[in-house]
Amino acid sequence: MTRLLTPDELEAHLREMGATRYHRLHPFHRMLHGGTCSKGQVQAWALNRYYYQAMIPIKDATLIARCPDRELRRAWRQRLEDHDGSPGGEGGIERWLRLTEGLGLDREDVVSTRLLLPGTRYAVEAYVHFVRDRSLLEAVASALTELFSPQIISERLAGMLANYDYVTPETMAYFQKRPPQAQRDADFVLDYVKTHARTPEQQQAVIGALSFKLDVLWSMLDALHHAYVSPGLIPPGAFVPAPGDG
């Protein structure tokens, strides 16, 4: 990039990336939301996605720990409470465990992460390391995928409740709670990068950070599709659906 984009041009470029590369377009998500996944495939998705959910507050705490900006720290720490919960109140991680239990998975199996796909573990940990090691602007910008989450959440709620008789509104509590949090976080991150990316190089770093995060989310679904759809090669030690669950 050789020309400094206006803030609105930068936003338009970021939104175009989401429109063409966000993981709602992945074939596995089309199966999941369209009702063509077996129960075992749905379980595998929820179990593997748990690791991403569980590592989000660790990623966020890493960002806060290296941030000299008090205002940014103050805004970002709300994310820890959203996921970890507060005294007397559950957070997103607990609501995700409610999803996995509602799907018939054992809580200890999920929390231990011992049944993860290697591709899931590597992708999630790469994201945490990115936030730890790259510039603060890039670390913040990697959360820009929240711009695109409202649509995937609405598709997931409607599709899974309509197509799987073992999925209930109580099971899907995470997705009912998350949209306003995601919208708040997305608005903050977008404003931050539009304000702080003041050179072509900084704008390219923001674009690169979003590209990396889109790749992380896509690669997680690639791993699921390879193991549980086609060619169906489940790595040794990973979750294996019960007979009859696909």
Image (cartoon, grey):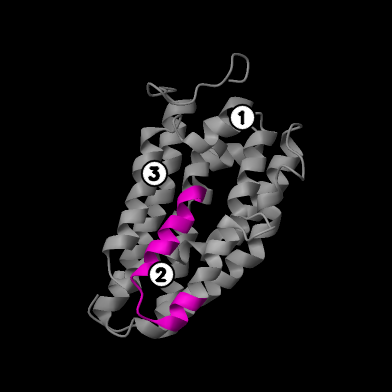
Direction from residue 174 to residue 198 in the image, left or right: left
Query: Which region is colored magenta?
Result: 53-74
At horizontal 48% and vertical 57% (from top left) the residue drawn is: 57
**Label 2, label 3: how many angstroms apart (C-alpha)?**
26 Å
Q: Secondary structure at mark 2?
A: helix
Residue named by callout 3: 219
At horizontal 36% and vertical 67% (from top left) the residue drawn is: 139
Residue 245 placed where, x, y %? 62, 20
Q: Quadrant of the C terminus?
A: top right
The answer to whether marks 1 and 2 mark residues whose Cβ atoms lie closer than 8 Å is no
Select label 2 or label 3 by which is in front.
2
At horizontal 44% and vertical 63% (from top left) the residue drawn is: 60
Question: Of callouts 1 and 2, which one flags the residue occurring earlier in the amino acid sequence?
Answer: 2
* Nearer the observer, 119 or 73: 73
Q: Which mark is residue 19?
A: none
Local crowd size for mark 2, using a 10 Å CA cut-off: few (<14), some (14–19), many (≥20): many
Residue named by callout 1: 105
The answer to whether marks 1 and 3 mark residues whose Cβ atoms lie closer than 8 Å is no
Q: Is residue 127 visible?
A: yes
Direction from residue 236 to residue 145 in the image, left or right: right
**Label 1, label 3: how many angstroms apart (C-alpha)?**
23 Å
* Nearer the observer, 240 or 113: 113
Residue 225 placed where, x, y %? 46, 33
Question: Of callouts 1 and 3, which one flags the residue occurring earlier in the amino acid sequence?
Answer: 1
Local crowd size for mark 1, using a 10 Å CA cut-off: few (<14), some (14–19), many (≥20): some
Residue 172 placed where, x, y %? 70, 46
Residue 61 forms part of the magenta stretch: yes
